[in-house]
Image (cartoon, coloured by chain):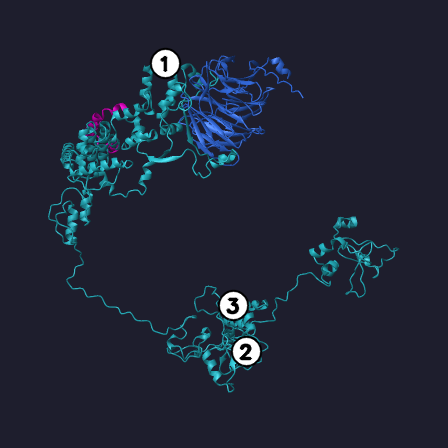
Chain colours: A blue, B cyan
């Protein structure tokens, strides 16, 4: 039997077409996040509210209020049943998605909490704060103390990511720390400049870190060697996000000049400079599987797709 | 009433059910004939009575067979397959084939609760009964053991059962059989009461027995068990309640009163009493008069008192009469021969008279005081010369009370101006070791200067010759300032250390360089030389093999340590107990794996040589629960710790947190941390002129004496503060363009001068760039305070501090 020839791999598409703009009406949008499957999005507002939207229908599904100050980050669990969010009010809140009620309010950080993540099974919430600690909160028990406090950072923790048994944190002390739970190891990579955002690549082999020297660096996870360096954007004073595309083909980063910069991962060349607006692109989030990008600027969230909007609407 | 009459019966209220009106033409209802009356059981089934009216029972279905279908037992199952099973499971019982009526009250197998044979009153424990009967005499309510007699377990205990098997019979004593004459039995031979009290009488009676076969052994006599019922009620020891038998009859000799005590008959037999006197029925006595049934008419109806009932003589009366009334002890009259007559009736129940009289204590009279004795005590140890500082009133008091003449004139000032040593001498205490006052620690010139100072400032009227604690403090302040003045030159410090240590013999307990034994040995050598007064103590004790730089450094440390821990403080500390775990206080937990040099990494990062140069790996212990939640096996299953491995280090210096080498050398710099923290009070620029500052303090001292105590603490800090160049050496050691939290203001100014190259960057993350030199201590203090936002530029500042609409941006906050 003859095997069909492999289809020619299409050129990776980039989310270069603006599909829609959502006015979130919650003050400045501090962070925008896809949920686990990419069908919903979460926006963290400076008016203390957290909103859940449908990406397709751009409909507001639910607004979660309970924070005492602006919401800085949020994450949804793998089964979409729970949301965790963190805020400047030093708390982390675990929400029940359906009812919108606060399941748990976790206090313990000494300063505002910059970033929050569920682990894969949503059994632990990890939150990084300006107080220099990462706290691991148990969602299963009724304990209000964290399971463990990771106080290795010497300055505020600006970003953290969890993939499987690994925790990646970026700190203002200019170091990227990777905690390997399985191996019982802590790997510290010195970057030098304060880290604003860290990411794992989808294949789990690389780490991406953006820092305030307006550079995004791709490091080999195991050795710490630099695989790529991406410059051109402006990131001097704000905590802006960076990310990898869903197929690890491109590196994306916010910029203070109102653009989203998109580099080719391997070549390091700028492949797209997406003009979002005049203000600072605050946050961005890439769809977990599709080519779809969310950006947040001021009070609005933009949804970007690979094709013009007409075709997208037909789908 | 009128209306009722007119309206007829309608207005009457009727109660009850009216009978059906009889209709005359209707035939009278006949009662149901007997054969038509039916009886149903509880399930409504008709019951037929077979045969005799009472004995018969109905069986079967409507008086036929078991069921509608015929004789088929409901529980029938073919046993062909289930034969074995059924037999194994449960053997058929008779109940399986019985009707439920059979279990009823009148059935053949009633299943109701009925009295078991286990409990029966037939069998009696005679011995226990007897004991109870004896005890009932003393009980408050006579006859309250009656109820117990009704219910009694028939089954005897295993002990009784065993005894019976061994041939014991009830009523016999327990033990080997005795060869003696048969006991005298009471007239009623069927009642074999073993215990007959008192034993003496019983033995006597035994002798009277005429027939006693030689070869027959007898069971030992039974013993009445002692009844240990607890005493209830509030009556005192030895109290006996009213004995109705005696009270009613008004006689001392108890007689039968069957009314209250059925056992009294047996009791009387028990004690071998025969009923005497005339037996009467009914109640008779003082208060009751004579009943109708009494035939004894000559008895007095009402009680008449007569003088013969009272004692007229204060003398021992012949016992046996009504001397003790009915509360007389039980054995009274029977044991009278054994008991001393003077104790009769006074022995409480349960007590016996002592066999031996109590030994008399001989008490000697006190010696007679001589006529010229004066009750005064003279203290032998106090010398006249030490009585100098006392007030006139005290001297007077002493003179009159002790007869002790105070030779010297009492000085001005009361006893409150005595110091501790003088007061101790007054009290005859031995003097404490070490210097008595802080003044002793001072150099003579300092002391003289102090005295001059005070003499000039204080009016002579208020002059105090004895140094008190206030002046001692002042002296310490002066000394501290003097030392601070000398801090600039190492030579003067050495002189001071020499002066402090010279001639002192106190043992040095503090070991500042304990971590480096050789260094500690050199230090001890230095100290011992100091004690001998060696001028070249320092140079001789230093290691000549070291480099000049190391030696100079060590020299400085030694001098500083010797001044810090000079014997004055050790003499003070001799009055306190040292803590048990001092080494724990001096140590702090720090990470075992220190991060390497940041400079190298920074250089590597600048050269984009990421990898081995910038990567560091540590052993890290996750929490067990965290591993569980992550579904990951714990990497170190035996580990009990969490986080990075920690080791203990000395905590003398904040620089322990930075690098190991530095901390070892600077270990003597105690309290550097406090100096660092309190920088707002004494800003560092002022530090350089420590000399000047201390001299200023000296001048202020004259004017403001009250503030001095507060400032003393500050002064001491000043005293131990290292020179400025040390700070510079430390801070410039880590990185050259650094800023540190303690020098923030100065640094900012510097940066402004430096130029605009990376100004925003530096401003924002000044700590981030200095990174390694940021002590964790400052991080923890900063985290407590509210972080302030420092923007990248002034344009974004406004947008950030006044969110959100001007600039919807989010900034990384700088740690302050």
Residue A134 at x, y percent in the picture: 45, 29
Q: Secondary structure at mark 1?
A: loop
Q: Which residues are magenta?
A: B684-712
Residue A34 found in image quarter: top right
Residue A32 at x, y percent in the picture: 52, 21
Residue located beneath label 2 in the image? B192
Indicate left or right for B328 with B734 as reference. right
Tell which tag, 1 or 3, sits nearer the viewer: 1
Residue located beneath label 3 in the image? B141
Q: Quadrant of the C terminus of chain B?
A: top left
Residue pictured at 59% horizontal, 14% vertical: A307
Q: Distance between the Cα atoms at labels 1 and 3?
A: 111 Å
Residue B747 at x, y percent in the picture: 32, 20
Q: Distance between the Cα atoms at labels 2 and 3?
A: 28 Å
| Badge 2 vs badge 3, beta-carbon distance below 8 Å | no
**Considering depth in this image, is B510 or A177 the residue closer to the camera?**
A177
Q: Residue B708 colored magenta? A: yes
Lower sequence index among marks 1 and 3:
3
């Amino acid at each position: 039997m003859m095997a069909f020839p492999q289809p020619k791999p299409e050129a990776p598409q980039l989310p270069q077409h603006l599909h829609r703009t959502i006015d979130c009406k919650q003050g400045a949008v501090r962070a925008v996040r896809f949920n686990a499957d990419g069908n919903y999005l979460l926006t963290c507002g400076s008016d203390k509210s957290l909103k859940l939207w449908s990406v397709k229908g751009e409909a507001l599904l639910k607004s979660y209020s309970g924070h005492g100050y602006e919401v800085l980050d949020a994450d949804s669990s793998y089964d979409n049943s729970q949301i965790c969010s963190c805020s400047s009010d030093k708390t982390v809140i675990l929400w029940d998605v359906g009812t919108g009620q606060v399941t748990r309010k976790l206090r313990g950080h000494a300063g505002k909490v910059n970033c929050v993540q569920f682990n894969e099974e949503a059994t632990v919430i990890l939150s990084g704060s300006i107080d220099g600690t990462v706290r691991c909160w148990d969602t299963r028990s009724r304990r209000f103390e964290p399971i463990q406090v990771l106080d290795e950072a010497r300055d505020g923790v600006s970003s953290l990511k969890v993939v499987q048994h690994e925790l990646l944190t970026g700190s203002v002390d200019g170091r990227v720390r990777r905690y390997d739970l399985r191996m019982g190891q802590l790997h510290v990579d010195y970057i030098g400049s304060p880290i604003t955002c860290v990411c794992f690549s989808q294949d789990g082999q690389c780490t991406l870190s953006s820092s305030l020297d307006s550079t995004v660096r791709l490091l080999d996870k195991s050795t710490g060697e630099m695989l790529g360096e991406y410059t051109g954007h402006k990131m001097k004073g704000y905590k802006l996000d960076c990310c990898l595309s869903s197929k690890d083909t491109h590196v994306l980063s916010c910029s203070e000049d109102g653009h989203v910069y998109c580099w080719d991962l391997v070549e390091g060349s700028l492949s797209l400079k997406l003009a979002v607006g005049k203000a600072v692109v605050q946050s961005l989030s890439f769809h977990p599987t599709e080519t779809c990008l969310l950006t947040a600027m001021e009070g609005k969230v933009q949804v970007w797709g690979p094709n013009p909007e007409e075709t997208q609407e037909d789908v | 009433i009128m209306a009722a009459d007119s309206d007829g019966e309608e207005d009457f209220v009727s109660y009850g059910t009216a009978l059906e009106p009889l209709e005359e033409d209707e035939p009278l209802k006949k009662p149901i004939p007997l054969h038509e009356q039916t009886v149903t059981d509880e399930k409504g089934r008709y019951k037929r009575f077979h045969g005799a009216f009472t004995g018969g029972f109905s069986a079967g279905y409507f008086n036929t067979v078991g069921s509608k279908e015929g004789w088929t037992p409901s529980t029938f199952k073919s046993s062909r397959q289930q034969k074995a099973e059924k037999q194994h499971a449960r053997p058929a019982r008779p109940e399986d084939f019985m009707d439920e009526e059979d279990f009823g009250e009148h059935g053949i197998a009633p299943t109701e609760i009925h009295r078991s044979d286990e409990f029966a009153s037939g069998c009696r424990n005679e011995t226990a009964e007897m004991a109870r009967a004896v005890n009932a005499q003393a009980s408050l309510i006579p006859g309250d053991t009656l109820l117990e007699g009704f219910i009694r377990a028939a089954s005897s205990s295993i002990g009784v059962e065993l005894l019976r098997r061994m041939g014991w019979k009830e009523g016999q004593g327990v033990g080997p059989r005795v060869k003696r004459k048969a006991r005298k039995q009471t007239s009623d031979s069927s009642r074999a009461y073993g215990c007959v009290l008192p034993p003496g009488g019983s033995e006597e009676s035994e002798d009277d027995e005429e027939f006693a076969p030689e070869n027959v052994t007898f069971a030992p006599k039974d013993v009445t068990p002692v009844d240990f019922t607890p005493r209830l009620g509030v009556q005192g020891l030895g109290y006996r309640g009213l004995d109705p038998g005696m009270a009613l009859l008004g006689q001392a000799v108890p007689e039968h009163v069957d009314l209250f005590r059925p056992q009294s008959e047996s009791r009387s037999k028990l004690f071998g009493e025969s009923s005497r006197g005339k037996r009467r029925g009914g109640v008779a006595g003082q208060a009751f008069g004579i009943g109708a049934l009494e035939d004894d008419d000559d008895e007095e109806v009402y009680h008449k008192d007569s003088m013969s009932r009272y004692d007229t003589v204060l003398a021992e009366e012949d016992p046996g009469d009504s001397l003790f009334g009915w509360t007389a002890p039980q054995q009274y009259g029977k044991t009278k021969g054994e008991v001393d007559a003077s104790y009769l009736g006074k022995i409480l129940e349960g007590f016996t008279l002592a066999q031996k009289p109590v030994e008399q204590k001989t008490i000697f009279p006190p010696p007679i005081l001589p006529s010229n004795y004066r009750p005064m005590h003279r203290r032998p140890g106090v010398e006249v010369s030490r009585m100098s500082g006392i007030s006139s009133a005290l001297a007077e008091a002493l003179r009159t009370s002790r007869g002790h003449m105070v030779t010297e004139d009492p000085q001005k000032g009361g006893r409150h101006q005595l110091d501790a040593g003088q007061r101790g001498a007054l009290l005859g205490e031995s003097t404490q070791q070490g210097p008595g006052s802080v003044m002793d620690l001072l150099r003579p010139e300092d002391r003289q200067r102090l005295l001059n100072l005070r003499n000039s400032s204080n009016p002579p009227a208020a002059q105090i010759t004895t140094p008190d604690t206030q002046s001692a403090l002042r002296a310490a302040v002066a000394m501290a300032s003097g030392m601070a003045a000398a801090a600039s030159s190492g030579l003067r410090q050495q002189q001071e250390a020499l002066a402090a240590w010279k001639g002192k013999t106190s043992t040095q307990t503090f070991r500042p360089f304990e971590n480096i034994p050789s260094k500690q040995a050199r230090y001890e050598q230095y100290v011992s030389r100091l004690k001998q007064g060696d001028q070249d103590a320092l140079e001789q004790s230093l290691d000549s093999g070291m480099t000049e730089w190391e030696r100079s450094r060590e020299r400085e440390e030694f001098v500083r340590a010797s001044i810090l821990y000079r014997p004055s403080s050790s003499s003070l500390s001799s009055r306190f107990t040292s803590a048990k775990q001092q080494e724990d206080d001096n140590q702090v937990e720090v990470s075992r794996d220190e991060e390497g040099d940041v400079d190298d990494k920074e250089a590597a990062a600048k050269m984009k040589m990421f990898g081995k140069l910038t990567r560091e790996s540590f052993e890290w212990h996750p929490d067990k629960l965290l591993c569980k939640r992550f579904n990951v096996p714990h990497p170190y299953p035996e580990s009990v710790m969490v986080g990075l491995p920690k080791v203990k280090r000395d905590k003398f210096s904040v620089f322990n947190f930075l690098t190991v080498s530095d901390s070892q050398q600077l270990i003597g710099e105690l309290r550097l941390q406090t100096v660092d923290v309190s920088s707002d009070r004494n800003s560092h620029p002022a530090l350089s002129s420590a000399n000047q500052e201390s001299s200023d303090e000296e001048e202020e001292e004259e004017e403001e004496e009250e503030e001095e105590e507060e400032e003393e603490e500050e002064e001491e800090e000043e005293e131990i503060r290292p020179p400025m160049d040390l700070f510079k050496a430390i801070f410039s050691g880590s990185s050259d363009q650094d800023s540190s939290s303690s020098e923030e203001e100065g640094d900012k100014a510097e940066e402004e001068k430096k130029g605009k190259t990376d100004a925003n960057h530096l401003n924002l993350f000044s700590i981030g760039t200095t990174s390694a030199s940021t002590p964790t201590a400052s991080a923890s203090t900063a985290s407590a305070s509210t972080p302030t936002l420092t923007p990248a530029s002034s344009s974004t500042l406004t947008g950030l501090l006044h969110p959100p609409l001007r600039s919807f941006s989010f900034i990384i906050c700088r740690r302050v």
